[in-house]
Amino acid sequence: MALEVLLVEDSKTQAAQIKETLESVGLRVRIAYDGPDGIREAVENPPALIVLDVKLPSMDGFQVCRRLKRNPATQDIPVIMLTEKSGPQATMSGLRAGADDYIPKDIFASEHLIETLQELGILE
Amino acid sequence: MAQVTGPYSHRPPIMSVRVEDAMDIMIVRDTTRRAASLLGFPPAYRAQLSSAAATLAELVLKTGEAHTIHLNGVIDGIKVGLQMSSETPWLAGVSANNVLVALRSKLGDLVDEIMLEGEEPPTIIMVMWLHNT
C-alpha cells in the first residue's frame, strides 16, 4: 500500500501541483488547508511525511512545525517545508522549528522534493 | 583573473555558476544543493548551504555586477566541507572588518566560517564542515 503524505497548503492551485508531484512517485496525498487542520489530521491519522507551507492562515508553518515536533504523537514524522520564503532567516526558522528540509518553491522544487523523499527513506 | 582558493585544500565536486540575473540565483541554489549532496550533507544542511549561496549571489547581483559563484569541496585534516566563494571587486577599498561583521550578521547562522581573502579583488569565502552535521 502506498505511503501517505499530509500536505498542508492553503493555495488550492499550489496544493494541486504538489499533490501531482507526490502522486507521480506513487504516494497518496491528503490535504489540509490550514495549520490547525493540519495538526489535527497529523495527530488523528499520522502520515509517513508532512509537506508544509510556511504562509498559512491563522497559524504559520513555523508554528505548525514546532507544535508537531513537540507532540509525542507526531514528533517523529518527517516534515519538509516547501515555501516561497527563501531568505536566510526564514530558512533557519524552518530548520530550528524542526523541519527535516526547507525547499524554496522555485523551478527546481519538485526535483528537490523527490530527492529529499529518497534521502528520508520515503521513496526507494 | 587569479582565482583565490581560500585556506583549505580543494577536492571534488568543483562547480561554478555565472550569475547575471535573478534566474541564476535559483541555479546557484540548485547547484549548491547538488554539491552538498555529493559531499554527503543531509537535507537540512543542504537547505542552509543553498540559502547562504543564494543570498551571497543576491547580494552581489544587487551591486549590478555579473559574477561567478564557485563551489568546491574542501579538506582540512580529516574534515570535509563545502566552500562557496565569489570575487567582489565592489568591496575593494571597503573595510574588511565591516564587511565581515555585516556578512556574519546576515549569514553567520548558515555556515561555519566566513572569510574575506585577497584585495584585488577581494573574495568572500564561506565554508560549512560536514563533521559539524
Image (spheres, rainbow, N blue to C red):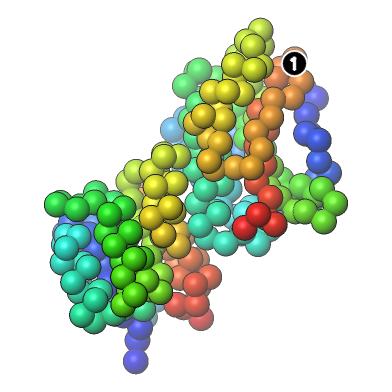
Task: Left or right? Give the position of B36 relative to A71.
Answer: right
Identified at 24% across, 63% down, the residue is A8
Q: Quadrant of the N terminus of chain A?
A: bottom left
User: Observer-nearest residue: A112 or A80?
Assistant: A80
Residue on which the image places disc 1: B119
Query: From where the camera sits, is residue B50 visible?
Result: no
Tag 1 secondary structure? loop
Identified at 66% across, 16% down, the residue is B96
Task: Left or right? Give the position of A93 relative to B105.
Answer: left
Task: Left or right? Give the position of A15 relative to A97.
Answer: left
The chain identifier of the residue carrying mark 1 reads B
Query: From where the camera sits, is residue B130 visible?
Result: yes
User: Observer-nearest residue: A82 or B98?
Assistant: B98
Q: Quadrant of residue A114?
A: bottom left
| Mark 1 crowd level (few <14, some 14–19, many ≥20, 10 Å Cα) | some
Amino acid type, residue under disc 1 in the picture: Glu
Identified at 43% across, 46% down, the residue is A91
Residue closest to the far bottom? A1
Q: Could you tell me residue A85's position as x and y percent?
A: 34, 43
Q: Could you tell me residue A98's position as x and y percent?
A: 41, 59
Identified at 63% across, 21% down, the residue is B88
Task: Left or right? Give the position of B59 relative to B126.
Answer: left
Q: Could you tell me residue B42's position as x and y percent?
A: 57, 62
Is residue B93 shown above or below A108?
above
Is residue A88 shown above or below A96?
above
Q: Quadrant of residue A21?
A: bottom left
Residue closest to the far top? B93
